[in-house]
Amino acid sequence: MHDIIVVGGGPAGLTAAIYGLRAGKSVLVIEKAGFGGQIAFSPKVENIPGFGVIAGAEFADKLAEQTLNLGADVELECVTGVEKTENGFVITTEEGSSFEGKTVILANGVKHRMLGLEGEEDLVGHGISFCAVCDGAFYTGQHAAMIGGGNSALQEALLLSEVCSKVTVVQNLPTFTGEQKLADALLAKDNVEVLFSTVVSEYITENGELVGLKLHSDATGADSEVRVDGAFLAVGLQPENENFAHLVGLNQYGYYDVDEFCAAKTPGVYVAGDCRSKFIRQVTTAAGDGAVAAMGACRWLDAQ
């Protein structure tokens, strides 16, 4: 039985593992895909303190290497359930395994909602991005598209408008759904074009890279194409927390309903990263959550 089982190998989960290991606890990290989470999709990252520029995949590798060097156990499996027992918790996986831990840190992250178009997954990191703060500078002086019309899309489009020669915003509704102040600021930009009641029907690619979008206007029924150097998707985030709701509780959007202490309603369970209700979802805030959750778990263990 491990002292701490961390579900998720992104920045939050790996930071939690590092803090737990440095506190002398035995730690198991269970990750369903690859270490790093969403950050691994960013070709370059420039907003991590201490790193001027680093590839997201390289940063993920460094986190994983540090965690392993400290002695973490790792399993590459998909966790499907966590149940409270008399002595702690039993974690079960899609692959049929089960693991026992005294405490659990849920750092299972979120996934970006996508449009569901053919070849979309393969274009992530090859013209499709999700974070203008992370990747916007790479399109300096170029033409970028922003797909979406909520607050996140408007904020991201405003950031892109400061560096891109042109920003085309594609919104499937006849109006923006974000704050009017943001909408007004965006519409006042000379280098921003907004296409309302328009959807992306297909990605245009060359040699595996995104070079344009095929569009369909719901208002006129017309089809068109626009050449772009990159496209940012801001059509929402999708938490996958339902399997663990009995331990934590979810808010109306499906995120774990916990505060800055990262403690769940179930003693011994903690939450870290983008999967919890929070104001900002960035790699730095995920790491901060991981540290808080791990220290909480360590204090809980020491008190038993």
Image: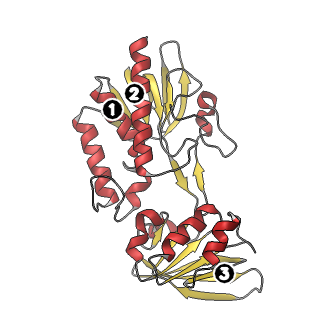
Q: Nearest the camera: 47 or 19?
A: 47
**In the rendering, at what x and y percent does residue 164 appear?**
46, 79
> What separation in Å lies between label 2 and label 3 (alpha carbons)?
48 Å
Residue 128 left/right relative to 259: left
Q: Amino acid at mark 1?
A: Tyr
Disc 1 marks which residue? 19
Q: Is residue 140 visible?
A: yes
The residue carrying pointer 3 sits among few (fewer than 14), some (14 to 19) or many (20 or more) residues within 10 Å by Cα, namely some
Residue 295 - label: 2
149 displayed left or right of 29: right
The residues bearing labels 1 and 2 have C-alpha atoms spaced at a distance of 7 Å
Residue sitting at x 36%, y 40%: 14
Q: In x, y percent, where is residue 162?
A: 47, 75
Q: Are marks 2 and 3 in contact (CB under 8 Å)?
A: no
The amino acid beneath tag 3 is Leu
Residue 144 point in image, percent of width and height = 49, 78
Q: Sequence order check: which comes first, mark 1 or mark 2?
A: 1
Element type at mark 3: strand
Amino acid type assigned to the residue bearing label 2 in the image: Met
> Secondary structure beneath disc 1?
helix
All told, the count of numbered labels is 3
Q: Residue at x 62, y 68 (%)?
A: 148
Residue labelled with disc 3:
195
Rendered residue at 43%/24% (across/down): 297
Relative to 223, say whether 95 is above or below: above
